[in-house]
Image (cartoon, helix red, strand yellow):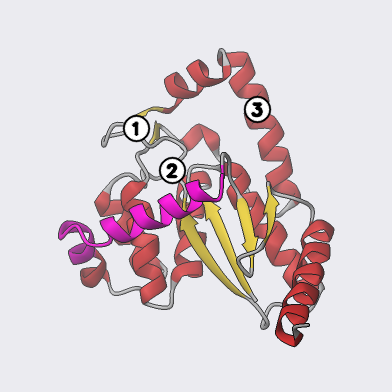
Amino acid sequence: MLIEVYSDIVCPWCFIGKRRLERALESAGWTNRTHVAWRPFELNPTMPKSGMDRHAYLNAKFGGVEARQAMEERVAKAAEAEGIAFAFSRIERTPNTFDAHRLIWFGQQQGKQDDLVEKLFHAYFSEGRDIGSRQTLVEVADEAGLDREAARQFLVNGQGVEEVRAEEAAGRRLGIRGVPYFVLNGRRAISGAQPPDIFVSSLQKAEVESSERKVGP
């Protein structure tokens, strides 16, 4: 089964959703029966290339310091339940993530996409690294097992732009307005970082639907 995940690296619920999906696949014994493909969805497509001060950006988005802090506490608690340690205090900037999505596309071509996505989430949310920086992206690619120089050349040469734009357009055609958004075998969808039992139920239904299509009338 193909599971396409539309997400953005700066989305904390996307990291949490990744963990919940992994728990669901493991509990249902589906880990080796599925292929997870990560698709781009920029939450901030007009973000300046150099990014923005994170506190200033989120204070404006959520309506002030107290609202931002309440959001961070709520998200951090949900992440902790999934074994993820968020370190919001380390994150200085909200980055432009287009290059990160390009690198994720490159990671798919190299068979390292899921490892790369995991490392990018960890680099941003747990280590506070600037994933808008190409130097940081090259370092994370190396940590995920990709060839460091090949990743650097890919980013510098501007490859993957059209492919990422095309995948983003596909997401818009699906009517996606928020992430994470999971598409099972191109048909059944799950919106949001749902509990593992919701994933399991949807996976089972998608499997039945796929079997029925194969059998036909």
Q: Residue furthest bottom?
A: 215
Q: Position of residue 118 (x, y in %)?
A: 52, 61
Q: Which mark is residue 158?
A: none
Q: Is residue 84 above or below residue 148?
A: above
Q: Is residue 86 in view from this perspective?
A: no
Please tell me whether mark 1 or mark 3 is closer to you in this view. Answer: 1
Instruction: Categorize mark 1 by other alpha carbons within 10 Å: few (<14), some (14-19), many (20+).
Output: some
Quadrant placement of the N terminus: bottom right
Q: Which mark is residue 42?
A: 2
Report the amino acid beneath label 2.
Glu
Label 3: which residue? 71
Write the residue at 39% across / 67% down: 143
Write the residue at 66% across / 83% down: 32
Instruction: Categorize mark 3 by other alpha carbons within 10 Å: few (<14), some (14-19), many (20+).
Output: few
Tell me which segment is drawn in magenta. Answer: 152-176
Q: Is residue 172 magenta?
A: yes
Badge 1 marks a residue whose secondary structure is loop
Write the residue at 76% across / 75% down: 207
For marks 2 and 1, give the CA distance.
9 Å
Q: Is residue 137 magenta?
A: no
